[in-house]
Image (cartoon, rainbow, N blue to C red):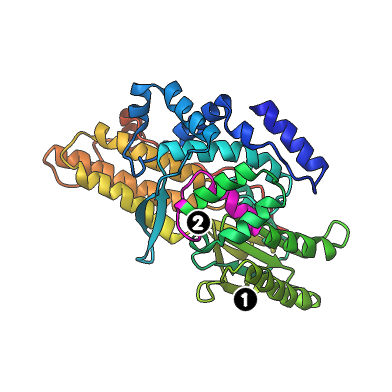
């Protein structure tokens, strides 16, 4: 599979106008489906509308499960099921809809992704980071931080209104067809899209991140072109980063680049109009960091600060909402298990802490981490003292280091060395 993907990638990169045919046969191969199954299983996830779990599949036999899928694909009888809709609460009181496909459909989507991804990876731009191989959210955050340090102080903090729900299928399929000339694969892709409704790509599906990147690639191209057209040697005057539908554009703050700021605003709207994607004007912000304003990107708050050594630097740390959210999760664990041993609580909170810290361990998160650990320490002490029928926090009973070591509670609240230095 790795060798096949490498060959597809090399061909796609060598000839940007080449339209691939004969791709469907690779989707139907047993080894493609096996690779997809392992990929889907690693991501785990809840069952779809049929209620089937990975345990169910493995009890009845993975090989026969995949063989049946392969046969349906070869015969052309495969029909994707409707997604199970789950609403996830958002910080603003609204909900985000997740479309949960069946494991069978996830495996087929994964097989399509494995074959399509190396083709479109060659077309994607440097500023696109969302769910791409060897690219991370941390890289996107660092790119933005570097731009702020280098005087890109005018910012468009872009918010798209219900982006995933409003992707137009005919536009998306047209973009895919620019690189794929395979009627069977195009038919399968259309079936998958229609299973989720008349428009949109389901959030949470295996294939939707790739499709959303294909859809917005022309916007990235426009920004990349503007960046290169205004380059002066090693100096650039525009930068951008996009992670799925979360995007930020930064322009040089010098007055001579006023025309670039106005032009990018105009061209951005023109490209999004072509895609029938709407900007959420209430949430989209146009900011000037030299006036003390700040913006958010991928869970971090960004602002520009003046250092003691009289240099401008960028400060980026977890948003207050991110801190509140993790504390609420941990508080809920303590509340639901207040009469159980601390070891049981530990087993539940350690994965939460580890995941949250690993995500926010870059930038200037030390103060936030210190707050979270102090708060956590008090919760631990109160839990232990209540178990003994005592009041207080037991400050004289145990040292904090002893507590964390004794109960093996996650305590690696260290921030990685910052890659972005002051100017």
Relative to residue 346, is residue 86 depicted above or below? below
Instruction: Estimate the x, y position of residue 326 in percent, counting from the top left.
Output: 37, 51
Question: Mark 1, residues whose alpha carbon is within 10 Å: few (<14), some, or many (≥20)?
Answer: few
Q: Does the segment drawn in magenta span residue 290?
A: no
Instruction: Estimate the x, y position of residue 145 in percent, counting from the top left.
Output: 64, 57
Residues 321 and 190: in front is 190
Relative to residue 242, is residue 361 depicted above or below? above
Instruction: Say which mark, if any, is on residue 27.
Output: none
Residue 47 figure quarter: top left
Kindly identify the residue that appears in the image at 57 percent across and 31 percent down.
28
Residue 91 figure quarter: bottom left
Residues 2 and 351: in front is 2
Instruction: Estimate the x, y position of residue 118 in percent, counting from the top left.
Output: 68, 39
Asked if the residue at tag 2 contacts the one at tag 1, i.e. Cβ–Cβ closer than 8 Å, the answer is: no
Q: Which residue is mark 1?
A: 291
Kindly identify the residue that appears in the image at 46 percent across and 44 percent down.
357
Q: Mark 1 or 2 closer to N-term?
A: 1
The magenta span reads 195-216
Kindly identify the residue that appears in the image at 55 percent across and 51 percent down.
190
In-image side of 182 versus 413 (left or right): right
Which dot, 1 or 2, sits closer to the camera? 2
Whether residue 411 is visible to the viewer of this picture, yes or no, is no
Q: Quadrant of the N terminus?
A: top right
Please count the marks in the image.
2
Q: Does the segment drawn in magenta span residue 212?
A: yes
Residue 18 figure quarter: top right
Q: SS at mark 1?
A: helix
In-image side of 57 versus 290 (left or right): left
Question: Mark 2, residues whose alpha carbon is within 10 Å: few (<14), some, or many (≥20)?
Answer: some
Q: Which residue is mark 2?
A: 299
């Amino acid at each position: 599979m790795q060798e096949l993907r490498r060959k597809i990638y090399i061909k796609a990169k060598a000839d940007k106008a080449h339209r691939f045919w004969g791709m469907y046969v690779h989707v139907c191969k047993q080894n493609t489906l096996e690779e997809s199954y392992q990929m889907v299983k690693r991501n785990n996830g809840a069952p779809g509308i049929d209620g089937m779990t990975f345990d169910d599949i493995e009890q009845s036999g993975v090989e026969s499960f995949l063989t049946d899928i392969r046969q349906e694909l070869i015969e052309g009888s495969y029909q994707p099921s409707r997604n199970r809709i789950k609403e996830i609460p958002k910080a603003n009181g609204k909900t985000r809809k997740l479309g949960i496909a069946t494991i069978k459909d996830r495996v087929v989507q994964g097989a399509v992704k494995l074959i399509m991804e190396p083709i479109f990876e060659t077309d994607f731009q440097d500023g696109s980071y969302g769910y791409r191989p060897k690219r991370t959210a941390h890289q996107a955050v660092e790119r933005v931080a570097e731009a702020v340090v280098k005087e890109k102080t005018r910012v468009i903090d872009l918010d798209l209104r219900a982006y995933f729900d409003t992707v137009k299928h005919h536009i998306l399929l047209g973009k895919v067809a620019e690189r794929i000339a395979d009627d069977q694969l195009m038919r399968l892709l259309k079936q998958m899209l229609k299973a989720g409704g008349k428009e949109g790509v389901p959030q949470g599906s295996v294939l939707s991140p790739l499709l959303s990147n294909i859809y917005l690639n022309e916007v990235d191209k426009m920004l990349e072109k503007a960046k290169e057209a205004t380059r002066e040697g090693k100096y650039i005057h525009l930068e951008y980063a996009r992670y799925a539908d979360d995007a930020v554009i930064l322009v040089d703050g010098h007055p001579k680049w006023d025309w670039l700021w106005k032009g990018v605003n105009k061209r951005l709207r023109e490209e999004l109009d072509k895609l029938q994607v709407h900007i959420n004007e209430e949430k989209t912000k146009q900011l000037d960091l030299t006036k003390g304003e700040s913006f958010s990107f991928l869970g971090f708050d960004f602002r520009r600060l003046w250092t003691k050594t009289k240099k401008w630097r960028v400060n980026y740390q977890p948003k207050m909402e991110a801190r509140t959210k993790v504390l609420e999760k941990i508080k809920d664990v303590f509340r639901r298990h207040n009469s159980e041993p601390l070891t049981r609580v530990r087993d539940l909170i350690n994965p939460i802490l580890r995941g949250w810290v690993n995500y926010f361990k870059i930038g200037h998160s030390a103060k936030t981490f210190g707050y979270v650990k102090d708060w956590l320490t008090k919760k631990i002490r109160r839990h232990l003292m209540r178990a003994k029928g005592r009041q207080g926090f037991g400050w004289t009973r145990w040292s904090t280091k002893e507590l964390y070591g004794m109960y093996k509670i996650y305590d690696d609240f260290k921030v990685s060395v910052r890659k972005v230095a002051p100017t």
